[in-house]
Amino acid sequence: MDVPNREDLEGLAGFYRLLSRLWVAEIDEMWFEVLSEGSLAEAAEDLGLRLEGPPAEVIEQLAIEYCQLMIGPQGHVPPHQSVWSEGQFQGNPVVSMQQYLDVVGEQIDSTMRDHLGVQLGVMGMVVDELSSSLEDDTRRNDLAELARSFFGDHVAWIDQFLVRAGESTESKFYGRLIAVTREFLAEECREWLKES
């Protein structure tokens, strides 16, 4: 991969962080405000993710939709890599994630380590670190390789989840978030996993 410039990498890291937050937990009052009229309202509008309506009602409806989609109790689509790769919760991807978390210096509860939102956040951290290391060829190359490796090990699988989630939800917000995430990760896959 040709490493983009600092500004592009910072934007890329920010987008990973945004997706991470939207997937890792329900929308709360703060995020409702941010997406409806706050600092990310314009970006949310461009992505088709802007929230409108009475805050308490919208937040409650989105919490229900999030729970139905990813938590259950039944008919949900598990957002954990172990379930998709091994058919069980807390499998080998959790161990692998811990190794990457050790490298980036993060501590995450073991039940969340292979959650797609956490994995998107870690990818954002790696890309952010890469953006600040462009002048040091060795460090830049090491971080680019870390990003490629992490993407292949812990981000590429997410498309499986997104396909199934798209088939399982009638939520306008989460349906759009699924589409945005799939489109973004397809482009990222072409970049991070292409043959050098």
Image (cartoon, grey):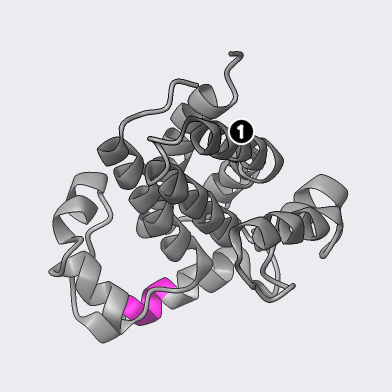
* Amino acid on which the number 1 mark rests in the picture: Glu
Res. 114 visible in picture:
no
Q: Is residue 18 left or right of residue 154?
A: left
Question: In which image quadrant can residue 153 be found?
Answer: top right
> Looking at the image, which residue is at 36% across and 80% down?
28
Image vertical order of residue 121 relative to residue 186, above or below:
below
**Residue 99 lies in the magenta stretch:** no
> Looking at the image, which residue is at 26% across and 40% down?
7
Name the secondary structure under disc 1: helix
**Crowding near the residue tagged with mark 1, few <14, some 14–19, many ≥20 C-alpha atoms within 10 Å:** some
- Magenta-highlighted residues: 58-62
Image vertical order of residue 132 relative to residue 174, above or below:
above
From the viewer's side, name the closer residue of 107 and 67: 107
From the viewer's side, name the closer residue of 112 and 100: 100
Magenta highlight: main SS: helix
Image vertical order of residue 29 relative to residue 71, above or below:
below
Residue at numbered disc 1: 145
Give how far across and how far down residue 95 sits, in percent: 82, 59
Res. 189 visible in picture:
yes
Q: Is residue 73 left or right of residue 190?
A: right
> Looking at the image, which residue is at 38% across and 76% down?
61
Image vertical order of residue 173 relative to residue 163, above or below:
below
Quarter holding the C terminus is top right
From the viewer's side, name the closer residue of 100 and 91: 100
> Looking at the image, which residue is at 53% across and 49% down?
123
Give how far across and how far down residue 97 sits, in percent: 72, 56
